[in-house]
Amino acid sequence: MKSIILVLSVLFILLCFVACGRVEQTPTVATEKENTTITEFPAENDMTTTKTKTQIAQTGNTKSVPSEYTKACEKSGTVERIDYASVDYAGNKEAITKTVYVYTPYGYDENDTATRYNIIYLMHGWGGHAGEYFDYSKNVFDNMIANGDIPPVIIVSPSFYNDNSSTDFGASVSALRAFHNEFENNLMPAVEGKYHTYALSTFDEDLKASRDHRVFGGFSLGSVTTWQIFCYDFDYVRYFLPMSGSSWYFGGYGDFQTEKNVDFIEQLVKDNNLDERGYFIYHAVGTNDAVKEQTLMQAEEMLDRKDVFTPEHYVFYQKQGGYHDLNAVQEYLYNALPLFFGSNG
């Protein structure tokens, strides 16, 4: 009798393991330990070589921002408001004035035209505003530069809204879908005509020639904007930081046409020789993020196409316990920015 009970008990435990193994339906990606593929990044100011500066696995978890990085830094950069002429691309196409906030690093000298700076554009999420990134992450930028994690850079915090924009969800999506026009025609020329970036002029050919020194990133609907910029403006931007969001080139919220979007991105890469010209995407989301599902679906699809989205072109990282909030964004910035332009060392 005892032997029969023992056998039944073992069978019950095995059945439990099998059942548990069938419950998980959420897309997952390999952890850093599971995926040992290493991607190499070139050294600062040597962006076209294969010289290794930093190595990371293609997937993994982000590292926390050191607490001291959130404190005021003695070598503090400056944030300046710039008003520039634009067009209401998502509306009536009338001429409008837009506002953007620009961070210049400690020691930036407007009279020093010989020193050139890499530039990073960061887009807010739904209901956000121009300058938002400096409200909560300026100290992190200051400390990363002061500690040599990244070289002195110019950081731009624009908005896809204008003074007359509705901030309801549908209008916000329409605005971000049209934003690439403003980025090309108005924002880049306004900012890079004033500050010393690697663009020798604001003529289109010079903006394109300096793509190796330009990043575009964003959070939430800003992440959706980032994927749009990749699809439309890969000629101008080499580095991308979509945070908590996927591509909506096709479809939209609740209609995540993941395979179709990744098909389009893959074809875009092949048709425009981006493997040779260079591009790099750091894709990130929190494990407790409300939009985790759509982000993971795209990450899974891209990681499955290993012959196209190789580690030197695409990595995907998660913040353990991370939510859809600005604390997570700060951590993504801390982890990603050193991979784009390296350090002072």
Image (cartoon, helix red, strand yellow):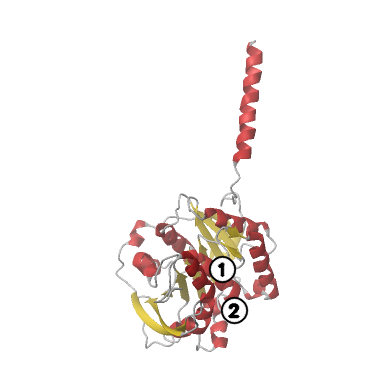
Quarter residue 334 falls in: bottom left
Q: Residues within 10 Å of mark 2 (few under 14, many from 20)?
A: some
Q: Which residue is mark 1?
A: 227
Relative image position of residue 119 (x, y in whole percent): 47, 76
Label 1 secondary element: helix
Q: Residue at x 51, y 65 (%)?
A: 223
Depth check: give the residue in front, 54 or 98. 98
Whether residues under marks 2 and 1 lie with C-beta atoms below 8 angstroms apart, the answer is: no
Q: Residue 318: x and y, percent?
A: 51, 54
Circle number at residue 17: none
Residue 45 appears in view: no
In space, the residues marked 2 and 1 are separated at their CA atoms by 14 Å
Quarter of the figure with residue 134: bottom left
Q: Is residue 273 visible?
A: yes
Q: Amino acid at mark 1?
A: Trp
**Residue at point 48%, 62% (across, down):** 220
Residue 325 placed where, x, y %? 42, 57
Q: Is residue 99 left or right of residue 224?
A: left
Disc 1 crowd, CA 10 A, few/some/many (<14, 14-19, 20+): many
Of badges 2 and 1, nearer the viewer stands 1
Q: Quadrant of the N terminus?
A: top right
Pointer 2 residue = 235
Residue 295: x, y in percent?
Answer: 55, 57
Going from N to C along the chain, the mark reached first, 2 or 1, is 1
Q: How many marks?
A: 2
**Residue found at the far front of this picture:** 92
* Callout 2: SS: loop
- For the residue marked with disc 2, what is the amino acid? Asp
Instruction: Give residue 164's quadrant in the image.
Output: bottom left
